[in-house]
Amino acid sequence: MTYGKLYLIPSPLGDCNPAEVIPAPVLERLKSIGTYVVEEVRTARRYLSSAGLKGQISGIEFYELNEHTDPMAVEGYLDLFKDGNDVGLISEAGLPAVADPGALLVSLAHRHGIEVVPFAGPSSLMMALMSSGLNGQSFAFCGYLPAKPDERKEKLKTIEKISASHRQTQIFIETPYRNDSMLADILSVCRGSTRLCIAADITMPDAFIRTMTVAQWKEQGLSIGKRPCVFCLLA
């Protein structure tokens, strides 16, 4: 059996012109891929249209892979690669397969010897870290913290202890509508000397990226609002 390649396609972190944040070779590659596995079809269609494929979307096949997709159903996506057919993987925002269910498709590709080709593009996690001024030599991505306040506070205490013990930057994210609750919990349980970077709407015109100590954040006061946000913490 001859399989095509799996291309990992980055997407913008917000509603902007793809040419401003996506490398030109990636935009060019989009024109040669006729099959995409995406987190949400509507978002992917809009992205590809604005990336130069307007008027060509009807000829593209889309398959969804998101939090509601049965892992067993992903196994069936192997057929998409048959006869040398290339497939593109697109996340809702940023790099696919990082904090993203698309990792299941990448795993499938490796198990069947399908070549995986990653493309460079915006990563909110790495862009937050690189602009935080915190430790970029040792860091960990914690994903989403618990939604329940008491559990979230305990988790924050734990990762702060890990950060202090290993001098390791802890990176985590939150559902936008819980950003301000997350910030309130950080300020209530973390040490005043712990440094915290808040990076919201990265790459967008209203981007906000700032690092201060927890004590300084308490004095500053901030409402993040319902914006895509990454938190970086170093105790």
Image: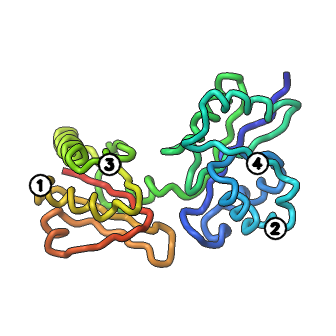
The image quadrant of residue 27 is: bottom right
Q: Amino acid at mark 2?
A: Lys
Helix, strand, or loop for circle 3? loop
Residue 174's tag is none
Dot placed on the residue nearer the N-terminal end, 1 or 4: 4
Q: Which residue is mark 4?
A: 62
How far apart marks 1 and 4 lie (CA) works out to 47 Å
- Mark in front: 1 vs 2: 2
On the image, the x and y values in percent for residue 86 come to: 80, 40
**Residue beneath the point at 31% across and 69% down:** 210
At x 38%, y 63%, the residue is 177
Between discs 2 and 4, the one toward the N terminus = 2
Please name the amino acid that badge 1 sits on. Arg
Secondary structure under badge 2? loop
Residue 167 in view? no
Q: Which mark is residue 191?
A: 1
Q: Which secondary structure lies at badge 1?
A: loop
Horizontally, residue 231 falls left or right of residue 70, namely: left
- Report how far apart the C-alphas of labels 4 and 3 lie in the structure: 32 Å
Where does the N terminus fall, quadrant-wise? Answer: top right
Image location (x, y in percent) of residue 214:
17, 62
Near-viewer residue (172 or 152): 152
User: Is label 1 in contact with label 3 (beta carbons under 8 Å)?
Assistant: no
Q: For the residue marked with disc 4, what is the amino acid?
A: Phe
The mark found on residue 54 in the picture is 2
